[in-house]
Image: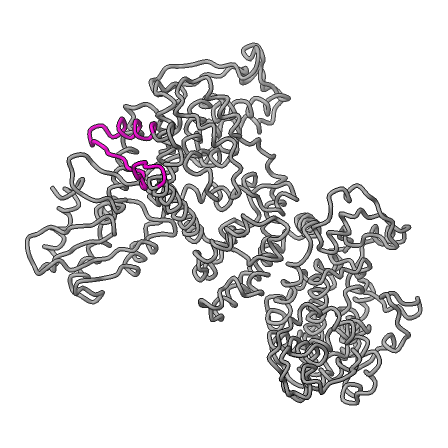
């Protein structure tokens, strides 16, 4: 990057920062990473000259430790450091950390440049110096009215564009861009709305210490400072966005009518300088009150060229790094503004950031020494993506009201009326689980993803698959666990970023792997505690959660065993599950557990059990409010769901989405009724939309409702006191609908669901489940993927024992599989893996291994479901293979083959 490209600088501070960072890049176009390296080298030369390398026997004449460098003033040392860098002088291996005194070096370098800038002919000849540069400088960025640079206004900018197009010369436009856009103060005062410009002339404002601390990125002060008010000389320009966003868009649209090449270089370099200046100021906590940072970022992200050319390569990465450093309160203000004014551009911004992240991931060389978590551009882009994710939620918050949360206290109160102590775990209600920490930005905005039903951008559009595939989830989980242990204020400063703290960017499969590591570590911890107790206290070791089950009494045996465990030591539920079927030989390496879960689910959801009601229209199950089963039975179902997630087992259960929303803490609402009972929802919706005012006479509906249980018995219920005498009319119909939905989804099944949720939380209470997953993703954890793509399974399958993808038997096998019906394919999965469900992420995530089991014979195929291992004889022809395979699928059950 040549010095002539910096002709747009208009003030001394901006020039000194850029000269300090890019003085090594005169005449070339090195990457930003090399610029950073150049800056570090200059710092090392400076500290070598002033502090030395720490080696007493050093003989480097340019090192203070050699005693050959004497009496250098800071200015002289800065000048000599620049000279040594330019001619690649000798650099010692120093023991000094330059970062500790980088601020001092920056100040001294500014002083040096002020004194010697005009003495360097190669700089003076190629650099355009603005009149403001030669003006006497002050300690502040303010200048006298006659010398103060001008900001941009819509009318003025439009006139410049129009005049340049008329004369066919764009030098005035280029000079204007170079004059304004590298300067944060000028950009922040550009395109101000009419109301904001009036308020800017008000008297000096007042800032609390807390506001100043936020601006200086210093969150460690005492709490009592929040109540103290300080007088300051300038209004708090950073507290709100004052940009006329429509004016900005009109100006950029007008600029877009000019060929990009006419001004691209000037705008790219100016924005690059702007972003680097902002990054440095934010990084070192030097936010200038006169600069409206929020205006700067709003204008920058409105650029229509961010996803193209040099804007994408040079500007966007640095802009993201700067934006990611904004204090929390400023981020929240940006989110509110964007949610109100920039929704139409939200999808494009999300896609642009995805392009940047994916490009960096695919072009990077990541390994044990340099993980994707270490790439500051990727991490910064993810942090900025979080802003747009919150914009997506905040903008949709107006379409649905905030829903009351379900609390553990409510559940316990409901269960205290039951004599079944199995459903109560008093200890779990008082646990302060670190993994339940919420996103600080969502908390600041007072929003939740659980309350967002119709996002502007679908949530799956925030997944970044290349990033999810390359993230080492074991390492990322370690970083995640460290952030849970550390205070909130230190997350971004002292610890490496964990993408699990930004779960919206990860696919459900990647998050499921992170949850797997959390569960396994907890299992190993319980195992160590068990062994320690056996050695120390002489207790018999029980490192596993062992269940001995009779096939004819699966529910009874499971209920008794889990009840004893939950009452004596609930932490035993956190151990690895091991199942043994009485009278059968076999070691549970996962396959027997899968079969156990399926047997329990089949019996619990059997209509004869009447615990759940089946809706033939939606093919979903719902809690039977008049069930005769005890709370313990529902607690068992909850425990089974929790254990399935904890042990990574997929279940064939069919609940409406409201069940998973309630498990994550939200009550059911009228919107949830659509999936539970579409016919009823449609009728209530027509009631709400009924255009006439004669509802009371036409419908003759009161606040008393009737419903049937699974046995066909009709029950009446008053939705409010004296409901039978209160008619539904034009004014109270919304109340009627809300009460009706609340009764069906919350009240009438309150006891059953409270027991169910209690069992679920007994297993998952210390898990980051609620932090990582939305309700739709929890359903995938429980039920697996709904997509059965056997092409993906074929591509992911491995072969052993002499088989390969080109073996004739294997080719016949897959041709047979692809011809099967969906039901037969599910039965094949059940035979080979122990589950007829696709794992989270699809069948491509299933590690199926097909091994050769001898030459052609009449033996049936065999499977080790613990390891997803299919043993297949090398049958002589396709017909025999199909006949043997279908017979194995039809008659397989339990341990062994029938």
Image quarter where the C terminus lies is: top left
The correct choice, above or below, for 247 with respect to 650 in the image is below
Tell me where residue 551 sits by quadrant.
top left
The correct choice, above or below, for 861 with respect to 782 in the image is below
The correct choice, above or below, for 796 with respect to 270 in the image is above
In the image, residue 524 lies at what x, y percent? 37, 47
Residue farthest to the left?
858
Q: Which residues are magenta?
A: 536-564
Image quarter where the N terminus lies is: bottom right
In the image, residue 723 lies at what x, y percent? 55, 13
Q: Is residue 669 visible?
A: no
Is residue 468 on the magenta stretch? no
In the image, residue 796 lies at what x, y percent? 30, 59
Give the residue displayed 44% in from the left and 62% down from the top. Answer: 470
Residue nearest the observer in this picture, 839 or 205? 205
Left or right of 208: which side holds 24? left
Left or right of 587: which side holds 226? right
Residue nearest the observer in this picture, 173 or 646? 646
Residue nearest the observer in this picture, 102 or 340? 102
In the image, residue 855 lies at what x, y percent? 8, 61
The correct choice, above or below, for 127 with respect to 357 in the image is below
Left or right of 470: which side holds 17? right
Q: Is residue 516 visible?
A: yes
Is residue 541 on the magenta stretch? yes
Left or right of 439: which side holds 137? right
Residue nearest the observer in this picture, 349 or 30? 30
Tell me where residue 284 sits by quadrant.
bottom right
């Amino acid at each position: 990057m040549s010095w002539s490209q910096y002709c747009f600088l208009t003030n001394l501070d901006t020039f000194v920062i850029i000269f300090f960072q890019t003085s090594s890049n005169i005449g070339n176009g090195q990457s930003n990473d090399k610029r950073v390296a150049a800056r570090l080298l200059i710092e090392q030369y400076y500290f070598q000259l002033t502090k030395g390398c720490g080696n007493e026997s050093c003989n480097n004449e340019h090192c203070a430790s050699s005693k050959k460098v004497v009496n250098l003033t800071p200015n002289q040392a800065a000048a000599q450091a620049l000279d040594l860098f330019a001619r690649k002088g000798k650099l010692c291996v120093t023991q000094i950390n330059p970062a500790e005194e980088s601020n001092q070096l920056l100040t001294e370098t500014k002083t040096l440049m002020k004194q010697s800038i005009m003495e360097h002919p190669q700089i003076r000849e190629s650099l355009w110096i603005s009149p403001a540069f030669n003006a006497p400088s002050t300690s502040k960025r303010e200048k006298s009215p006659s010398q103060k640079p001008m900001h941009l206004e819509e009318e003025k900018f439009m006139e410049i564009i129009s005049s340049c197009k008329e004369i066919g010369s764009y030098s005035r436009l280029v000079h204007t861009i170079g004059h304004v856009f590298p300067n944060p103060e000028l950009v922040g005062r550009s395109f101000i709305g009419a109301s904001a410009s009036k308020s800017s002339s008000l008297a000096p404002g007042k800032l609390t210490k807390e506001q100043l601390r936020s601006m200086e990125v210093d969150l460690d002060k005492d709490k009592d400072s929040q109540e103290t008010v300080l007088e300051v000389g300038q209004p708090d320009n950073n507290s709100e966005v004052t940009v006329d966003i429509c004016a900005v868009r009109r100006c950029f649209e007008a600029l877009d009518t000019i060929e990009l090449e006419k001004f691209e270089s000037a705008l790219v370099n100016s924005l690059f300088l702007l972003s680097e200046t902002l990054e440095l100021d934010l990084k070192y906590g030097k936010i200038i009150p006169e600069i409206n940072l929020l205006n700067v970022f709003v204008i920058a992200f409105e650029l229509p060229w961010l996803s193209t050319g040099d804007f994408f390569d040079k500007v966007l990465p640095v802009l993201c790094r700067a934006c990611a450093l904004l204090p929390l309160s400023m981020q929240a203000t940006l989110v509110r503004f964007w949610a109100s004014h920039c929704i139409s551009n939200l999808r494009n911004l999300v896609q642009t950031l995805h392009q940047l992240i994916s490009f960096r991931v695919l072009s990077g060389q990541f390994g044990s020494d340099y993980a994707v978590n270490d790439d500051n551009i990727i991490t910064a882009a993810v942090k900025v993506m979080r802003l747009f994710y919150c914009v997506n939620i905040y903008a949709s918050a107006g379409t649905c009201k905030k829903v009351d949360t379900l609390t553990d206290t409510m559940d316990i109160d409901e269960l205290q009326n039951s004599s079944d102590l199995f459903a109560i775990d008093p200890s779990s209600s008082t646990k302060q689980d670190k993994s339940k920490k919420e996103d600080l930005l969502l908390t600041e905005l007072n929003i939740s993803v659980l309350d967002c039903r119709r996002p502007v951008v679908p949530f799956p559009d925030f997944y970044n698959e290349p990033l999810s595939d390359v993230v080492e989830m074991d390492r990322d989980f370690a970083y995640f666990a460290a952030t849970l242990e550390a205070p909130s204020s230190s997350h971004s400063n002292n610890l490496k970023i964990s993408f699990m703290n930004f779960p919206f960017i990860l696919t459900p499969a990647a998050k499921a792997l992170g949850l797997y590591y959390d569960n396994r570590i907890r299992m190993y911890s319980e195992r160590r505690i068990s062994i320690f107790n056996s050695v120390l206290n002489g207790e018999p070791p029980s490192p596993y959660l062992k269940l001995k089950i009779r096939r004819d009494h699966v529910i009874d045996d499971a209920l008794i065993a889990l009840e004893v465990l939950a009452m004596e030591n609930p932490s035993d539920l956190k151990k690895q599950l091991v199942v043994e079927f009485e009278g059968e030989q076999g070691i549970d390496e996962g396959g027997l557990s899968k079969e156990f879960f399926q047997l329990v689910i089949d019996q619990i959801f059997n209509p004869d059990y009447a615990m759940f009601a089946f809706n033939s229209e939606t093919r979903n199950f719902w809690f039977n409010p008049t069930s005769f089963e005890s709370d313990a039975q529902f607690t068992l179902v909850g425990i089974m769901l929790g254990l399935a997630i904890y042990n990574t087992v997929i279940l064939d259960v069919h609940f409406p989405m409201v069940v998973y929303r309630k498990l994550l803490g939200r009550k059911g609402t009228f919107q949830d009724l659509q999936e539970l009972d579409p016919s009823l929802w449609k009728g209530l919706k027509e009631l709400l939309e009924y255009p006439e005012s004669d509802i009371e006479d036409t419908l003759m509906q009161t606040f008393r409702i009737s419903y049937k249980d699974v046995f066909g018995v009709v029950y009446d219920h008053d939705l409010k006191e004296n409901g039978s005498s209160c008619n539904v009319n034009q004014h109270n119909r919304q109340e009627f609908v809300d009460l009706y939905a609340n009764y069906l989804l919350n009240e009438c099944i309150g006891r059953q669901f409270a027991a169910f949720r209690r069992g679920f939380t007994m297993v998952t209470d210390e898990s980051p489940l609620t932090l990582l997953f939305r309700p739709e993703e929890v359903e995938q954890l429980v039920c697996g993927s709904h997509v059965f793509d056997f092409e993906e399974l074929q591509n992911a399958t491995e072969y052993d024992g002499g088989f390969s993808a080109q073996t004739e038997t294997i080719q016949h096998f897959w041709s047979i599989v692809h011809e099967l019906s969906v039901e037969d394919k599910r039965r094949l999965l059940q035979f080979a893996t122990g589950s007829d469900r696709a794992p989270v992420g699809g069948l491509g995530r299933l590690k199926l291994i097909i091994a050769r089991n001898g030459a052609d014979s009449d033996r049936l195929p065999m499977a080790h479901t613990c390891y997803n291992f299919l043993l297949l004889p090398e049958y002589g022809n396709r017909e025999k293979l199909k006949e043997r395979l279908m017979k194995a699928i039809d008659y397989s059950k339990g341990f062994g083959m029938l």
